[in-house]
């Protein structure tokens, strides 16, 4: 008998660089989008959204790692997340999660010990369940995979916060992408970028890129890759993180189909 040729795997991009771009699967991304809009989400849009989410979470983890290193710790705790955001305002994303997390209520009294457990001497002023955020906890496996890829470990409370931030950020990204489709671009929001003290101004090519995304082409029923890029410019106000997210998303989707 003659050997049958190997059948190509189905369900996503075939290049290794694209497959490795994010620990967040396109099927999960599309599930989040379905919670927000009935519009069709193209394959390249799903990969772009996954890539942007990965870039944001990676930057947060890097900032938390630096905070932990200053205290000679390897395991990340929620306090490291607060430190990362305090030092880099660009990382303040997914802020709807803050109302549901003891970490951010910690700004008014919660204290975590070295294992990420709420110290008994401090109590929350009110109790809120993280499950109140639609889609929370969908990203736990992806967060853990991302932490491993960055050579980091984290206490459960820190994993929960990264999970929640990823969920809220992607939900907000989906809403903005749907708005971009409905409005025909981001003209309503403009293309100005925030100048952060002590950091260089965004390079000209980023400003040109933002102008190019200010109007869209295509039908009004499908969220495409460029709609995700446009939504990214709305969600990420800092020039540096925004630039990295856009660059990585374009790289991640250069070999994907638009279906």
Image: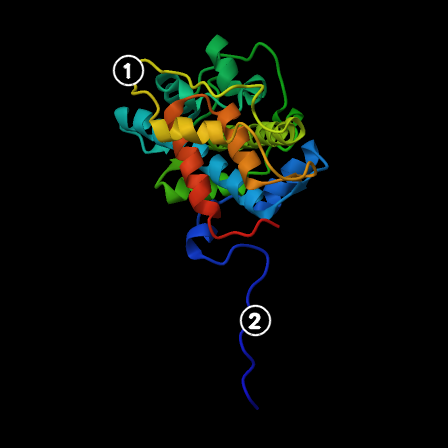
Q: Quadrant of residue 246?
A: top left
Residue at (41%, 16%) from the top-left corner?
194
Q: Quadrant of residue 30?
A: top right
**Which residue of the protein is positioned furthest toward the right in this rendering?**
38
Residue 39 % position (x, y):
70, 38
State left or right for residue 164 relative to residue 179: left
SS under mark 1: loop
Q: Is residue 147 above or below residue 178?
A: below
Query: Which residue in the structure is indicated by mark 2?
Result: 7
Query: Which residue in the structure is indicated by mark 1?
Result: 198
Residue at (39%, 29%) from the top-left corner?
206
State left or right for residue 179 relative to residue 166: right
State whether residue 56 appears in this view.
Answer: yes
Say which mark, if any, is on residue 188. Answer: none
Distance from the alpha carbon under mark 2 to that under mark 1? 54 Å
Give the position of the N terminus as an image quadrant. bottom right
Q: Is residue 25 above or below residue 9?
A: above
Residue 80 % position (x, y):
38, 24
State left or right for residue 34 relative to residue 242: right
């Amino acid at each position: 008998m003659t050997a049958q040729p190997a059948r190509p795997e189905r369900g996503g991009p075939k290049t290794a660089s694209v497959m490795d771009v994010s620990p967040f699967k396109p099927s999960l991304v599309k599930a989040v989008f379905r919670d927000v809009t009935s519009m069709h989400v193209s394959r390249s849009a799903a990969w772009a959204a996954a890539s942007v989410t990965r870039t944001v979470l990676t930057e947060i983890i890097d900032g938390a790692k630096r905070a932990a290193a200053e205290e000679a710790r390897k395991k990340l705790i929620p306090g490291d997340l607060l430190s990362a955001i305090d030092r880099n305002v660009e990382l303040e994303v997914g802020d709807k999660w803050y109302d549901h997390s003891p970490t951010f209520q910690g700004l008014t009294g919660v204290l975590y010990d070295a294992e990420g457990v709420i110290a008994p001497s401090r109590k929350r002023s009110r109790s809120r369940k993280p499950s109140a955020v639609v889609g929370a906890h969908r990203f736990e496996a992806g967060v853990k995979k991302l932490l491993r890829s960055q050579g980091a470990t984290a206490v459960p409370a820190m994993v929960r916060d990264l999970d929640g931030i990823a969920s809220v950020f992607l939900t907000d990204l989906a809403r903005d992408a749907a708005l971009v489709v409905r409005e025909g671009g981001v003209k309503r929001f403009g293309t100005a970028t925030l100048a952060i003290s002590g950091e260089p101004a965004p390079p000209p090519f980023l400003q040109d890129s933002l102008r190019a995304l200010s109007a869209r082409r295509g039908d009004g029923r499908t969220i495409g890759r460029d709609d995700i890029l446009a939504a990214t410019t709305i969600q990420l106000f800092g020039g540096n993180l925004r630039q990295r997210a856009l660059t990585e998303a374009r790289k991640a989707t250069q070999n994907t189909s638009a279906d």
